[in-house]
Image (cartoon, rainbow, N blue to C red):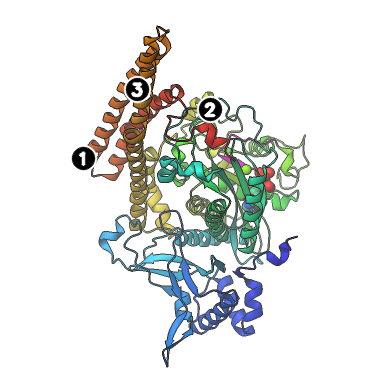
Amino acid sequence: MTNVPELFGSMVFNDAAMRERLPKETYRALRKTVEDGKDLDLGIANAVAHAMKEWAMGHGVTHFTHWFQPMTGTTAEKHDSFISPAPGGKVIMEFSGKELIKGEPDASSFPSGGLRATFEARGYTAWDPTSYAFIKDGILCIPTAFCSYGGEALDKKTPLLRSMETLSEQALRILRLFGNTKAKRVLSTVGPEQEYFLIDREMYEKRRDLKYCNRTLFGAKPPKGQELDDHYFGSIRPRVSAFMKELDEELWKLGVLAKTKHNEVAPAQHELAPVFTTTNIATDHNQLTMEVMKRIAYKHGLACLLHEKPFAGVNGSGKHNNWSITTDTGENLLNPTDEPHGNLQFLLFLCAVVKAVDEYQDLLRVSVASAGNDHRLGANEAPPAIISMFLGDELTEVLESIETDSDYTDKKKCDMEMGVHVLPNFQKDTTDRNRTSPFAFTGNKFEFRMLGSSQSIAGPNIILNTIVAEALGQFANRLEKGDCFKQDVLTLVKDTVQQHKRIIFNGNNYSAEWEAEAQKRGLLNLKSTADCLPYFISEKNIDLFTRHHIFTKTEIFSRYEITLEGYCKTLNIEALTMLQMSKKSIIPAVSAYTGELAESALAKKQLGADTSVEEQLVKDLSAQLTCFLQAVDTLDSALIEVKQYEDVAECARYYREHVFAAMQELRGISDTMETFVSKKCWPWPTYGDLLFSV
Ligand code: ADP
Ligand code: MG
């Protein structure tokens, strides 16, 4: 049996490893640096580097890498060995503090938006001592932030760390007003639930769309999909189970708190959820989780699909971002307690989130925008593209009673003296679940459910941290000036509810009525990446980011460009793949099959047999093939036409409106033809083969 406690973190240079291997003084100085967010002294860095190298070499490691998270949304690494020339033609194994703290990878081939033109190609990676180094595939990986020569962030980690700092700063102002003098930092915490598909590797290899685009671009619906709901939470099949077991163990070795695993709604779909942790580490761990999933799947003869919509007509995959804020002393600030004073504080933090989500709906939407996620949002399986919040009946009533100065006394106790409406002891289960809300309060945290399965969670958490910090900052500005604190807080809560209650919706978000209602309420409904990205560079949002030092204006524009460019490139690759599959495989396959039919009809005719079936099929398929060829032409022309557009936003819009439409049209015809062509002639495994392959 696996000794899990022993296994856990065995590949991580964690606190225990540091305490054991570092001189006491160095260890203490390092802890202080991490806790206080101070700059690292080179002497300490040298000592840490040495201990890290010795520890890694003890595990057979010969190379190290600065592991970072460029704007591609994945992770990057470049391996350097520890060797250093020594007299007599020999080498020694060396790793200095300087090498630990700073790396200089060439930044020129990573997406940098407008930054590339104006700045040198050189980039720097800087050690993030708040995330532990670890060994992956025999390489010592040092989590780092990545920036340009001019100091512009080129990665997802830098702004995430910045957003955590601003959140801490603003939340502390509020806590001080409540008389909390103990907390030194406030941290946001995240537990991301990761969905994925597993299919047989051999079948995967036969599909060029999956290999190039991570999703199927053609494929008729199989007779059986997810309609029986027999897969959700179903017993896990042996091959999948073996995969999950090894995945857990590998993740545990890396210190990832893999906790829950189960089958999801669609056939071949599964989920993994870790225990939540600090946002920064949760982000690193989620990136690692996705990477390890793919690797272990490969080992088991499987392919792990992380795309948001690998199969049309079947549920796609998302990532639920469970988010909360907590003090360094362990107090969850979104935990409603039954203690009145604490409740007032809770109400204020709750209201900060309400205000933030309402005022920055656009940014939350932008933070989950991608070509892949466009297939899910608003498609009756994932939350709609409209941002709203679910608070549940009880909390909504509490807020309403404050707003209208009415009593909440009938149902719950209250603190008469202060007129504070006491919250019920709000255990998770006292309110029903709302599975349809994009942003749901779930007991002591919020669950942001719009994230795509393949995306880094950094982006959405940068936004969450920043917008809540902004709301808290505005609250603090107001309360610090007031003279009757408790009354001021109540008034603030009341004002906030009045101004922002339009964002609260506890009903069915999937219904058509909600879409109409949301429009009446003036909520945004940004359906695609092309629709929402322009909001990212609005004056209001530039002002937010620059004031909180999350992004400079240059960084904002560079990210805007990178995201839109990424969107265009993704659609371009998909369209080209479709054209290739059409010309090289689908057309020849249908033509060959109709040829076969025609031949057999001719042969049958000589015997005087009835050939009406063959003749009809040949006619139908030939007519469809003609349409198909026209659709190929249309897509081809759309790809030529798009080259005219120089502005990246216009280009994205064209892809969305014309290229994507042409792709859909092409697919539709192919999928119909597929249902008539014999299995042996069809060039690749069908949906049925793929979805029920494991
Ligand atoms: P569910 O019933 O939706 O599965 P869980 O309580 O199991 O809810 O939590 C789902 C995810 O939320 C897990 O990853 C869990 O660790 C995470 N989570 C729980 N509490 C918090 C918190 N305070 N902050 C962030 N994430 C949390
Ligand atoms: Mg969930």
In depth, the one of 180 and 545 nearer the eye is 545
The x and y percentages for residue 657 are 33, 32
Tell me the amino acid under the disc marked 1: Gln
**Which residue is at the far left?**
644
Q: Magenta part of the protein: which range?
A: 432-443
Residue 171 in the magenta stretch? The answer is no
The residue at 37%/37% (across/down) is 531
Q: On the rendering, which quadrant does ligand 2 occupy? A: top right
Q: Which mark is drawn over residue 595?
A: 3
Residue count near mark 1 (Cα–Cα under 10 Å), binned few <14, some 14–19, many ≥20: few
Residue under pointer 2: 222
Visible residue check, residue 190 = yes
Q: Secondary structure at mark 1?
A: helix
Residue under pointer 1: 644
Q: Main secondary structure of the magenta part?
A: loop
In depth, the one of 216 and 515 nearer the eye is 216
Q: Is mark 3 within 8 Å of ligand 2?
A: no
Residue count near mark 2 (Cα–Cα under 10 Å), binned few <14, some 14–19, many ≥20: some
The residue at 67%/39% (across/down) is 395
Tell me the amino acid under the disc marked 2: Pro
Structural distance between the alpha carbons of marks 3 and 1? 40 Å
Give the mark nearest the N terminus, 3 or 1. 3
